[in-house]
Amino acid sequence: MLGTPGQLGGDLVDEGTRRGHEMIGRTQWECDITDSAAVERAVAEVQPDAVINGAAWTQVDAAEEHEAEAEAVNATGAGYVAAACASAGIRCCHVSTDYVFDGTATAPIPEDAVPLPRSAYGRTKWHGEVAVREQCPDHLIVRTSWLYGRQGPNFVITMLRLASERPELRVVADQHGAPTWTGHLAPAMLRLLEGGPAGTYHLTNSGVTTWYDFAVAIISARGLPARVVPITTAEYPLSAERPAYSVLDNRAWRELGEPPLPDWHEGLRSYLAGLEPSEPS
């Protein structure tokens, strides 16, 4: 597992161990995926049955000013990992994002929709997908969205912290997506790794919401007094353009006969129940 101990990486390692797999994680310092020789050495040393690449440049706004650096990790590095997997004859699982789409859809987006990213982050992640497909025939590309997990930083922890500091929070209400808890995503990814056909999959919690409604659910669940005020994207300008609609249709997953991932409300409840007492509340 490359990219530990990130939000998803930690849950993948724990879930894989529970399922009887020997899970070996590598941090970005232990295996720099922008160094092809380092990637090849890591694969040769561990001799894994498969590699999950969760290493990525995830600073969406910073990527606008540092696209070359983001490209080195999200695209070139992803290609190095895929090439090393292909040379070793093993499966490569690559984590991607809803940002590869332009956000103009009005219905859940299927896996075969044409990507048209509008941000540097989205472009570099799309280039990474292309590299993985070209370099490793036995690949799994898993696109997900609005991800949050125990390690943070993430939207849930940020809202809890701000709600403990401020009487009012202003949150964007015109972007639609599916918040996805790593505790639900990790088991699904492992099931794909264990026997799913190669290809591209969308994996998100079920349901649709906005950042505003997500924030309201977070604050309400903890009984915090902060008031949440809906605003527009235009009222909260950021360097990188966000998709207005990035709900992913998990069609390929369902076609395997798998049940949909639980509703995002259930993911939020489970996540909040597992937060340590020292974390924002």
Image (tube, rainbow, N blue to C red):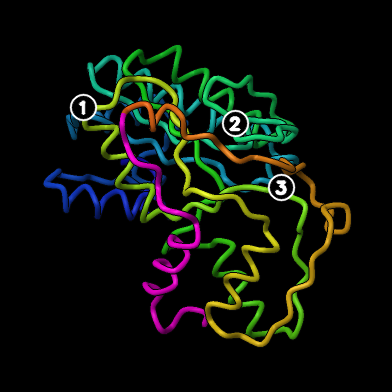
Residue 219 percent across, percent down from the top left: 60, 76
Q: Total marks drawn?
A: 3
* Of pointers 3 and 1, the one earlier in the residue sequence: 1
Of the residues tagged 2 and 1, which is closer to the observer?
A: 2
Which residue position holds label 2?
109
Which residue position holds label 1?
44
Which residue position holds label 3?
61
Residue 245 percent across, percent down from the top left: 70, 41
14 or 192: nearer the viewer: 192
Residue type at the position of mark 1 = Ala
Q: Residues within 10 Å of mark 1 (few under 14, many from 20)?
A: few
Residue type at the position of mark 3 = Asp
178 or 69: nearer the viewer: 178
78 or 196: nearer the viewer: 196
Residue 73 percent across, percent down from the top left: 52, 34
* Of pointers 3 and 2, the one earlier in the residue sequence: 3
Residue 118 percent across, percent down from the top left: 74, 32
Q: CA distance from mark 2 to mark 1?
A: 38 Å
Label 1 element class: helix
Question: Is residue 20 toward the left or the right of residue 13 in the image?
Answer: left
Label 2 element class: loop
Establish if 34 lies above or below 206.
Answer: above
Question: Is residue 130 toward the left or the right of residue 246 in the image?
Answer: left
Where the N terminus falls, by quadrant?
A: top left
* Of pointers 2 and 1, the one earlier in the residue sequence: 1
Residue range (magenta): 257-281
- Look at 47% across and 28% down and name the residue there: 77
Magenta stretch: includes residue 123: no
Label 3 element class: loop
Residue type at the position of mark 2 = Ile
Q: Quadrant of residue 98?
A: top right
Q: CA distance from mark 3 to mark 2?
A: 24 Å
